[in-house]
Amino acid sequence: MIEFRSRLRRPAAEAEAEPETSAGAESDGRAENHRPRLVAAVEPSFEPADGGPVVSVDSGDEPEGPTAYEDAVKMLARKPLSSGELQRALVVAGHPEVDAEEAVATCEESLYLDDAGLACSVATKLRDAKGESKARIRQKLRERHLPDAAIEAALADLDDEAEFELLAQTARDRARRMAGLDRQTAERRLLGFLARRGWSGERATRAAREALDGTGSGRGTVRFR
């Protein structure tokens, strides 16, 4: 019996001999219990059993942005675009090339894209509003990344007779602004003006001279009606 009691006293003695260690362990335990627990956002209902604070952590999954097709529809709602312009705009917006191509194809099937209609509309505007030549119109349409087939179809609607009449009218309108210039200077400036609009060669020279002559007589002075 005495031996048993002595054995019971030994742990107590040891506990008294190491009060700081036990207290430190208990303190560490309390600190550990009160440390924030990290819980993934996908488990919002989890709470630590010891009642410690819960800290939600973003799982890293970000919401997906609009698809290439959704962006394409928004772009076309803002202004008319060619298929080439739309595909380039989607790639610039960050969509992969293959997704951009699929979105363009879907827009064409849904009739949101009409390259032929756009080419005709742009060509008519350039011809009627700005008096541009066929060569200049072709250049402008290519800058819009329109298919060659659509460009040529739009230019086919502009007949050659109307082309020369437009050239002659444009030359006459410009010649009226050259009062007081000598013939050589006026002709040089008029030919440069026509060239910037896509007209050059024999037809442009003839139109310029007729415009400067006023009556087509080939006189060496600038005449105005």
Image (spheres, rainbow, N blue to C red):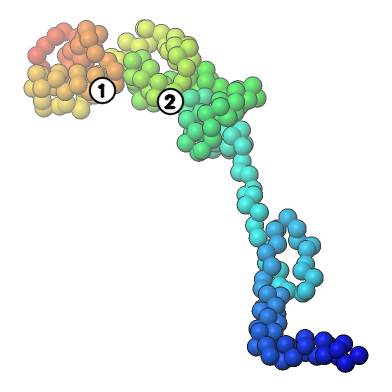
Residue 112, given in percent of the width and then of the height, sits at 60, 27
Image position of 55 with respect to 135: above or below: below
Q: Is residue 207 left or right of residue 110?
A: left
Residue 156, given in percent of the width and then of the height, sits at 44, 9
Q: Which residue is mark 1?
A: 196
Q: Quadrant of residue 151?
A: top left
Q: Nearer the viewer, mark 1 or mark 2?
A: 2
Q: Secondary structure at mark 1?
A: helix
Q: Is residue 214 left or right of residue 169?
A: left
Q: Which residue is mark 2?
A: 144
Indicate the amino acid at tag 1.
Arg
Count every numbered label the image shows and give the total.
Answer: 2
Q: Name the image quarter holding the C terminus.
A: top left
Indicate the amino acid at tag 2.
Arg
> Nearest the camera: 70 or 16?
16
Residue 59, given in percent of the width and then of the height, sits at 66, 54
Residue 38, given in percent of the width and then of the height, sits at 67, 64
Dot 2, how many residues are within 10 Å of its Cα: few (below 14), some (14-19), or many (20+)?
Answer: some
Could you tell me which residue is drawn at 72 percent across and 92 percent down?
16
Could you tell me which residue is drawn at 71 percent across and 75 percent down?
33
Dot 1, how many residues are within 10 Å of its Cα: few (below 14), some (14-19), or many (20+)?
Answer: few
Image position of 24 with respect to 125: above or below: below
Could you tell me which residue is drawn at 72 percent across and 87 percent down?
14
Q: Name the image quarter holding the N terminus.
A: bottom right
